[in-house]
Image (spheres, rainbow, N blue to C red):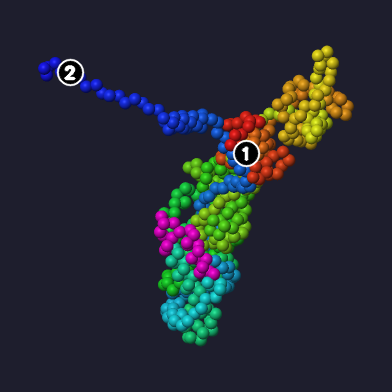
């Protein structure tokens, strides 16, 4: 009997029970799908708030300073002590340093300096300037700046200390060692600098790109209390207030600067600005250099060979807008004498000639917005006018055919909820933004809203937020 038994098992299917919860869930799911689909297929218009701003066509360069520099050498051997402060102007005959053959002056200075000394406000300012200049310009990839800073501070402190001793020069004369000390004065007037680097006689025609490699630059700091030999360099004088900064650039930039003749330069060290006269030089290897010549500020940078500068070739202030908002639009150009006002609100427009069913000439007022004007003409909206239409002068009924067209540059203003063209006057433009004149009669004002991407809308299109 077991062989006759039916071994097929039929699975019981539970009937589908549809309730109100499932229907609500399904409706919500379908609604979400429709919203997502609508979002990705709908046109998205992004607004942009117009604000005041500026565009500066800036270029930052590291330049090499050229000055009229003369190296002064020692006339005899001995221990050197400096008295003139670096970066200050000395006149002919002013004491700059002393040379002590016996070394007794150094011992005397050390003994005199073992007591309490105080720094004046000027002395403290000089030290603070050294420290501030180091902290702002320090580059971790150029550790030699640390040694330059060390030598600068040591030299400054020693010169300040020696200057205090110099104030009591009578004590030196009474000490019995003055016969062994040579008091050396400046041969001519100039700015004293206590360092040499081999760039003193450099001219524009000798420039190559290798000169700008800081890693190969060597600067020798001339330190007080050192033993020197006859003929060794002891200091240098910068004898002319006129000086230059040379930068390396390309021929296109050089031609742009040459056309300007003078360019505004910002010194990044202290944020001061000055105007430099432009000249250029191209060496046999095709490397292009621009020389900027100044007649001031040399004393401020007399100890610096490499100077970071910023060229300010354009500096316009106005309303800052993205270039993607800018669009061109054509308009009809008509004489001002043909434009009149009519309607209940005094709308602007023209009187156009038309003909009725019987062929009789009549006139109708066509409202037309003014988008720009010159001394004699208006730029009118072309939405209701056509080329060949005749318009009438209100006073004389003189006829003229509409035929002249012109193009304006502008943006779409959306303050009123639709794309309204506004003419702009571009003051300056770079690759991303433009600065336009603000508060013009037919233009933009600060805090207006415009379409970020002008290609995404049509004129008069309703903007759905």
Of residues 420 and 181, the one drawn nearer to the viewer in this rendering: 420
Extreme residue in the right direction: 396
Q: Nearer the viewer, mark 1 or mark 2?
A: 2
What quarter of the picture does the N terminus occupy? top left
Image-based side of 331 in relation to 169, left or right:
right
Q: Within 10 Å of the Cα at label 2, are there few (<14), some (14-19), or many (20+) other Cα atoms? A: few
Q: Residue at x 68, y 41 (%)?
A: 444
Mark linked to residue 6: 2
Mark linked to residue 450: 1
Residue 305 appears in the picture as rendered: yes
Q: Which type of secondary structure does the marked residue at label 2 adopt?
A: loop
- Main structural element of the magenta stretch: helix, strand or loop? helix
Q: Residue at x 74, y 24 (%)?
A: 385
Q: In this rendering, is residue 269 above or below 39? A: below
In terms of image quadrants, where is residue 458?
top right
In terms of image quadrants, where is residue 230?
bottom left
Image-based side of 345 in relation to 326, left or right:
right
Residue 435 appears in the picture as rendered: no
């Amino acid at each position: 009997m077991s062989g006759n038994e039916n071994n097929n098992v039929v699975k019981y299917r539970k009937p589908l029970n549809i309730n109100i919860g499932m229907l609500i869930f399904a409706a919500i799911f379908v609604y979400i799908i429709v919203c997502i689909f609508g979002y990705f297929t709908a046109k998205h218009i992004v607004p942009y708030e117009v604000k005041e701003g500026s565009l500066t066509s800036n270029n930052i360069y590291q330049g090499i300073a050229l000055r009229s520099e003369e190296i002064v050498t020692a006339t005899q051997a001995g221990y050197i002590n400096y008295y003139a402060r670096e970066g200050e102007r000395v006149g002919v005959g002013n004491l700059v340093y002393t040379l002590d053959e016996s070394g007794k002056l150094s011992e005397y200075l050390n003994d005199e300096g073992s007591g309490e000394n105080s720094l004046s406000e000027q002395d403290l300012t000089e030290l603070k300037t050294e420290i501030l200049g180091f902290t702002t310009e320090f580059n971790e990839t150029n550790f030699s700046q640390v040694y330059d800073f060390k030598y600068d501070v040591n030299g400054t402190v020693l010169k300040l200390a020696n200057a205090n001793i110099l104030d009591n020069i009578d004590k030196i004369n009474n000490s019995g060692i003055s016969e062994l000390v040579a008091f050396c004065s400046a041969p001519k007037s100039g700015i004293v600098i206590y360092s040499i680097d081999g760039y003193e006689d450099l001219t524009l025609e000798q420039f190559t790109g290798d000169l700008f490699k800081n890693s190969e630059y060597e600067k020798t700091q001339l330190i007080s209390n050192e033993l020197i030999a006859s003929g060794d360099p002891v200091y240098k004088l910068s004898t002319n207030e006129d000086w230059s900064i040379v930068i390396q650039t390309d021929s296109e930039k050089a031609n742009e600067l040459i056309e300007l003749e003078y360019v505004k330069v910002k010194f990044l060290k202290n944020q001061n600005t000055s105007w430099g006269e432009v000249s250029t030089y191209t060496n046999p290897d095709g490397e292009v250099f621009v020389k900027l010549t100044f007649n001031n500020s040399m004393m401020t940078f007399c100890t610096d060979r490499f100077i970071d500068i910023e060229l300010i070739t354009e500096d316009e202030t106005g309303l800052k807008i993205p270039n993607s908002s800018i669009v061109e639009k054509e308009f009809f150009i008509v004489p001002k004498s043909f434009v009149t006002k009519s309607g209940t609100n005094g709308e602007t427009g023209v009187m156009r000639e038309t003909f009725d069913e019987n062929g009789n000439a009549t006139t109708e007022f066509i409202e037309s917005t003014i988008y720009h004007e010159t001394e004699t003409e208006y730029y009118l909206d072309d939405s209701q006018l056509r080329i060949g239409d005749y318009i009438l002068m209100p006073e004389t009924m003189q006829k003229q055919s509409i035929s002249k067209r012109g193009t304006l540059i502008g943006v779409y203003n959306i303050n009123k909820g639709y794309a309204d063209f506004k003419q702009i006057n571009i003051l300056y433009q770079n690759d991303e933004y433009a600065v336009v004149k603000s508060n013009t009669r037919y233009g933009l004002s600060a805090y207006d809203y415009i379409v970020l991407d002008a290609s995404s809308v049509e004129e008069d299109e309703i903007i759905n937020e």
